Image: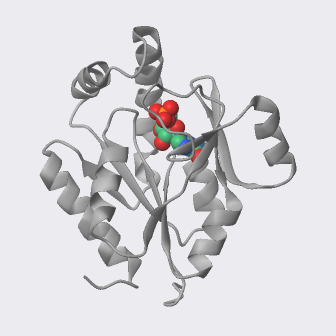
Amino acid sequence: MINKHKGRLFVISGPSGAGKSTLINDAIKSLKKFHVSVSVTTRPRRKNEIEGKKYRFITEEEFDSMINQSMLLEYAEYCGYKYGTPKMFVEKEIENGNNIILEIEVQGAMQVKKFMPEAYMIFIITPSMHVLKERLHKRNTEEPHIIEKRLVTANSELDYQKYYDCIIVNNDYNEALLNLRYILKMQAKNIKD
Ligand code: 5GP
């Protein structure tokens, strides 16, 4: 059962290049009481990324130490690097009545689903693998060999769609944005416009 005074946890997954981050950031601009969790990762920082905004970039040793101290809500390896959600922020904010969004890949999402079945799970996809490939090349944040790796991973990630509460197809951006915003608002149950 959902406690009215607590916030809710939202998990959003989908292949790399499906447009998750942009959609999430735009969707919560006009929604109160929504925050996106900052992950830790061992992946190197991209040129346009700011430390502490979407990620804290940490070493393998720091990551392992966080695992050993049970500081991560979930974690997984993705295309050779580790990614995880610090537990304390999520627990504190939910307790304070804020809704928290985790933008995470499918293995981590399955861990969350198991331990927090009340979390609402959203999967974002592109209309086809062809479109996904085009978008990954166009955004130009990874080398071509990394893009190939991400496309292979994307294929296996699609098998997990069935474990999610809803699927949003990011074909027309504005339509996908409206859908995401509506779903977040309806499922949060503790916010008004
Ligand atoms: P990117 O390297 O493109 O930023 O992220 C690669 C994948 O890792 C994406 O699918 C992203 O959603 C996922 N990811 C980001 N943060 C986390 C996290 O904290 N935990 C897990 N399991 N996956 C994450």
Screen quadrant of the C terminus: bottom left
Residue 121: x %, y % from top left: 44, 60
- Furthest toward the bottom, the residue is 4
In this orientation, which residue lies closer to the viewer: 7 or 89?
89
Report the quarter where the N terminus lies: bottom right
Q: Is residue 164 left or right of residue 67?
A: left
Residue 119, x across and y down, in percent: 52, 68
Camera sees residue 131 = yes
Q: Residue at left 58%, top 51%?
A: 110
Residue that appears at 39% across and 22% down? 141
Q: Quadrant of residue 86?
A: bottom right
Residue 105 seen anywhere in this rendered image of the structure: no
**Residue reaching furthest to the top:** 145
Image check: 129 left or right of 115?
Answer: left
Question: 165 or 93: nearer the eye?
Answer: 93
Question: Can you say whether 137 is above or below 135 in the image?
Answer: above
State the scheme by which the image is colored: one colour
Q: Is residue 122 left or right of residue 93?
A: left
86 in relation to 139, above or below:
below
Q: Which residue occupies 40% across, 37% down?
A: 158
Residue 123 place in picture, x, y as percent:
38, 50
- Number of residue marks: 0
Looking at the image, which residue is at 30% across and 63% down? 29
Residue 13 position in % (x across, y down): 44, 47
